[in-house]
Image: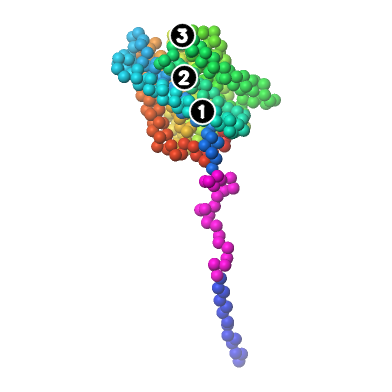
Amino acid sequence: MEEKQPHHQIQVTVDLSLTPSQPNPADATSPNEQPNDASPPLLARFHAGYFRISLSLCGQALLWKTLSEPTEDAHAFRRALQTFPSTAFLLLLLWSISLFVHLFLSLLYLLRCFFHFHMVKKEFLHHVGVNYLFAPWISWLLLLQSSPLINPKDPYYVVLWWVFALPMIALDVKIYGQWFTKGKRPFLSTVANPTSQLSVIGNFVGARAAAEMGWKESAVFMFSLGMSHYLVLFVTLYQRFSGSHQLPVLLRPVFFLFIAAPSMASLAWDSICGTFDVSSKMLFFLSLFLFASLVSRPALFKRSMQRFHVAWWAYSFPLSVLALASIEYAQEVKGRIAHALMLVLLAFSVLVSLGMVVFTAINSGHLLPNDDTILSHST
């Protein structure tokens, strides 16, 4: 018989100390991610979209100045507000805060222009970033109209109106000229987005400021410029052409600019005509319809509200302008429903603005993130 051969077992021992250590996946960084010590400086992370904050604060200042102005047959709420002893002080305080915030943001952006001009140039050439270049000039015009210190008949008012209106007209020539002449295919259908309405809002704000100082011809000029392009832009945005640039999810709050454009147009036409006539009412009703369409679709904004972002401030300014239009409408109609609507919209506007201030204060550490995806889209 054959004798069975014994099986020899070989044991292999591996000294892990001699093998190269494997990187921890949790510690791995993507190629595009910069380490914390190489994060972009503050001025590089700052962009024109942050003017949403001053735009909203200036809109609230104009809202409360309008409420405090004495008018005939005013609602009981407005009469009580006008007789309140500290109303003038609160209005001056709100206007001063708005002025300080806007000056601070303007100074930051001037420094950005000096140290990071290539980023400003990218904003100017971007289909979203260029629209927010209107925001600082709109804020200045709102501050001018809401100022408790400057009267529309003062010569300073005229000079400041020219200083703030001319840059917007120059931007109008650049943007509207591109819409009209650029490319063999429809250019507007590829670049139009809700932020494009800031250009027409700027024209309406300038028209209202001109009408307040009695310059009716200049007011009609700016109003016609804004209204003609608003009609084209509104139809373009309504159709959602294929191939157009998609708006980032975090920027979805800017859909509320659909409310601001017709609301400000109604206010501008009211100042030009001296009364809240049928045309102003039609624009106000359009803004109410758009407001109802947006608030009835909260799922549209669900993903954009998961993490705080400065784009949240896009809710505040349109609601302030809508509340402003409701004040003029209630003053003209003098009915219970109109005054109830005014009170609801006014309360909603104030609560949203206060909420934005609170959320910004709580999340101040995340106000200028290093990995701002909106920055990469808008610059």
User: Where 20 sits versus 314, above or below?
Assistant: below
Q: Nearer the viewer, residue 167 or 250?
A: 167
Q: Which residue is mark 2?
A: 142
Q: Nearer the viewer, residue 268 or 364?
A: 364
Looking at numbered disc 2 in the image, what kind of residue is underneath it? Leu
Circle 2: is it few (<14), some (14-19), or many (20+) Cα within 10 Å? many
**Which SS class for mark 2?**
helix
Mark 3 or mark 2: whose residue is earlier in sequence: 2
Q: Is residue 98 left or right of residue 241?
A: left
Looking at numbered disc 1 in the image, what kind of residue is underneath it? Leu
- Residue occupying the point 55% across, 57% down: 23
Residues rendered magenta in the picture: 15-38
- Image x and y of residue 132, in percent: 54, 27
- Image x and y of residue 346, in percent: 37, 22
The answer to whether mark 1 and mark 3 are in CB contact below 8 A is no
Closer to viewer: mark 3 or mark 2: 3
Query: Distance from label 1 to label 3 (Cα)?
Result: 29 Å
- Residue occupying the point 51% across, 15% down: 160
- Residue 25 is inside the magenta segment: yes
The label number, if any, that marks residue 107 in the structure image:
1
